[in-house]
Amino acid sequence: MKIAILAYDRMTALDAVGPYEVLCRIPDAMVYFVAETPGPIRTDTHGFHSHFALIADARLEDVPNPDIIVIPGGSTGTTAVMQSERTLQWLRTAHVTSQWTTSVCTGAFILGAAGLLQGLHATTHWGSKDYLPQVGATYVAERFVRQGKIITAAGVSAGIDMALYIAAQIGSEELAQALQLAIEYDPQPPYTTGAFAHCSPEIIARAQHEIRSANGMNVPASSESDATQ
Amino acid sequence: MKIAILAYDRMTALDAVGPYEVLCRIPDAMVYFVAETPGPIRTDTHGFHSHFALIADARLEDVPNPDIIVIPGGSTGTTAVMQSERTLQWLRTAHVTSQWTTSVCTGAFILGAAGLLQGLHATTHWGSKDYLPQVGATYVAERFVRQGKIITAAGVSAGIDMALYIAAQIGSEELAQALQLAIEYDPQPPYTTGAFAHCSPEIIARAQHEIRSANGMNVPASSESDATQ
């Protein structure tokens, strides 16, 4: 069982590490963080609020046939990857033989740029939902959306829920239940504001501001958001 | 606002990255991953199910007075850090001036080894709860436990809930609500098995087995667990 998690400059760390902590505990799983250039990969808050980086340990071409593909999101980094023919070609080829092809957050736009979401329902980070039609998909406000073997998850933390679903599909409910216990995933969010439908315009504007600020994009919260964040 | 997240060999990635994604979006926060030796830091599943590593970007001594300290857990790595006088001394000194001194998962044992949990209530990963008295603390089955400025969080994913609490304390409820939306933290865990009190003995044994297996400790699930995992 080979699992490839795409890593790229200015990715969101939790988009990848959430699913990682579940998927790496599936028996016989081998997880690779694949990138165009292995080595240190800056996260999307790098340089503004931290210098945090992850390490990609394999080239894309080293893992041509993963059983599970996970494409995380990121701020400006996602837009760059959407234009990288090398990554898109790897993704299209890997998708032919994958069991599951998945995204978290704005990673959906990378699936979309590879042509994999055409005509499908999908989800992404709420802040980018209006742009899904640009890659041929229809936004659905769900935690994750399955269409055949493609699963798109909502923003950042949603990859954990998606990964537990995948564990149940490729293993068993008992495995997924045990992995949920392994990471003690008994979430107790302090507010109901994790879903934008429950948020006031003020909270949404504040969230947009903090996201853009942490990503080094100091644009007023009231302005139009761009395709990714 | 300086935030120091301890990084060490065989730490659990999500213990650190969960709080990171919240705390790095606090206005004027600067987050450092501090380690005895900066550079690549292997996670606790490295070498068994992956080669995943994070990068520590600062020496412990480079961040002597953080406002917030976050100590993640890890498998055998935690035990090693509990015996590192250099890290424990940094932690004791930093704790004198910190606003918040926190742990996630078995990171509580590092706080404990530094003498910071003596006589306190605390929490940790369920699999290590029986060992908290060895560092002078009494286990409480809560998502996180606050005692003055010390907060200990439960296993792995609990750091996200704790970080949102801290954001509300140092900022405002509105900030914490916005950060919860920023990471779209609207968790929908598929099962109730995230809390061990809700789990059958079979699920608990399976979880212990998968944890130990992913960490390269191939001990039968029925055997005694050790102080950390």
Image (spheres, coloured by chain):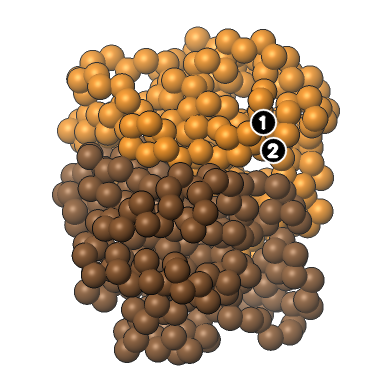
Chain colours: A brown, B orange
Q: Secondary structure at mark 2?
A: loop
Identity of the residue drawn at 40% across and 89% down: A136
- Return the mark for residue B38: 1
Q: Are marks 2 and 1 in contact (CB under 8 Å)?
A: yes
**Vertical comparison of A69 with B57: above or below:** below
Q: Which residue is mark 2?
A: B57
- Disc 2 marks a residue whose amino acid type is Asp
Residues at marks 2 and 1, CA–CA distance in whole angstroms = 5 Å
Whether residue B25 is visible, yes or no, is yes
Between A153 and B34, the one nearer to me in the picture: B34
Between B115 and A63, the one nearer to me in the picture: A63
**Vertical comparison of B176 with A111: above or below:** above
Identity of the residue drawn at 19% across and 54% down: A170
- Can you say which quadrant of the picture contains the N terminus of chain B? top right
**Vertical comparison of B106 with A225: above or below:** above
Q: Secondary structure at mark 1?
A: loop
Residue B108, percent from left and from top: 55, 25
Drawn side of residue B58 relative to residue B18, left or right: right
User: On what subunit does the disc labeled 2 rest?
Assistant: B
